Amino acid sequence: MARQQLGVVPNSMLTMARQPAVLGSFAMLVGNILGPPTDRRIPIWTGVRLFWKNIVWTIRHQQSKSRVPAPLKSLVAHVSSNASGCRYCQAHTIGEAFHLGVSVEKLEAVWDFENSDLFDAAEVAALRFALAAGSTPNTVSSEHFAALKLHYSDEQIVELGATIALFGFLNRWNDTFATTLEPESAAFAQKHLGGSGWEIGKHG
């Protein structure tokens, strides 16, 4: 589909292909948002094939034993959302991390993960990556990837990057539309992040 629309397969999609489920989901999202060019409609069976491939890729991904642990991904999403400034996503990701089993002590220390003994070297590498990738301008460097490679496979690094990119979308969405934060999420975030400077802002 990309070759049909652009004339080339973008290198960014080749990186995503290290995690086929990520690539398939991205392709469907792009198709649903941008749609095909009006003068070059994509055959319906092309979309059907992609849909079924994505189901298979998703099942395989969900069953993989080498996935990045969900609690860590929630913290990665939180740190990248903090870097971008989205209070809505900060509240949701800290709540998700709690429900996934992250301790309250760790939640309350996550904004200062560099100086906390609660985070191991693998977690620090992932959170540094999240902070750099969530910042504007992006400050990810070769040093970040070198640190990640000490603890994660290439596929896991793509998974971490996909988590950050997903929340980049959600950060912009919720800040653009000033999505009202649910009372339960607001109360939890205020209780556990208020001491670090979190406030509801435009999402109240």
Image (cartoon, rainbow, N blue to C red):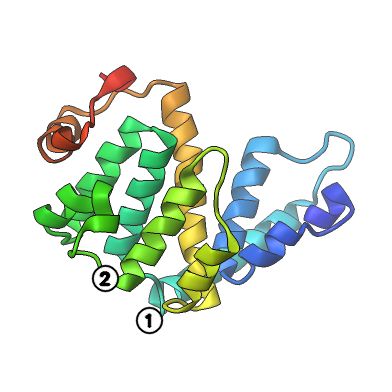
Q: Element under label 2?
A: loop
At x 23% / y 26%, what residue is drawn?
A: 199
Structural distance between the alpha carbons of marks 1 and 2 = 21 Å
Above or below 151: residue 173: above
Q: Position of residue 119 (x, y in %)?
A: 24, 65
Q: Is residue 117 left or right of residue 56?
A: left
Q: Is residue 57 left or right of residue 11?
A: left
Q: Position of residue 36 (x, y in %)?
A: 77, 41
Sequence order check: which comes first, mark 1 or mark 2?
1
At x 47% / y 23%, what residue is drawn?
A: 176
Q: Nearer the viewer, residue 9 or 151?
A: 151
Residue occupied by mark 1:
65
Residue 166, can we see it? no
The reply to whether discs 1 and 2 touch (Cβ–Cβ < 8 Å) is no
Amino acid at dot 2: Asp
Q: Pointer 2: residues within 10 angstroms few (<14), some, or many (20+)?
A: few
Q: Element under label 1?
A: loop
**Quarter residue 128 falls in:** bottom left
Q: Is residue 124 left or right of residue 56?
A: left
Of the 4 image quadrants, the one containing the C terminus is top left
Nearer mark to the viewer, of 1 and 2: 2
Residue 9, can we see it? yes
Q: Which mark is residue 174?
A: none
At x 31% / y 55%, what residue is drawn?
A: 74
Residue occupied by mark 2:
120
Q: Residue furthest front?
A: 115
Q: Position of residue 161 (x, y in %)?
A: 51, 58
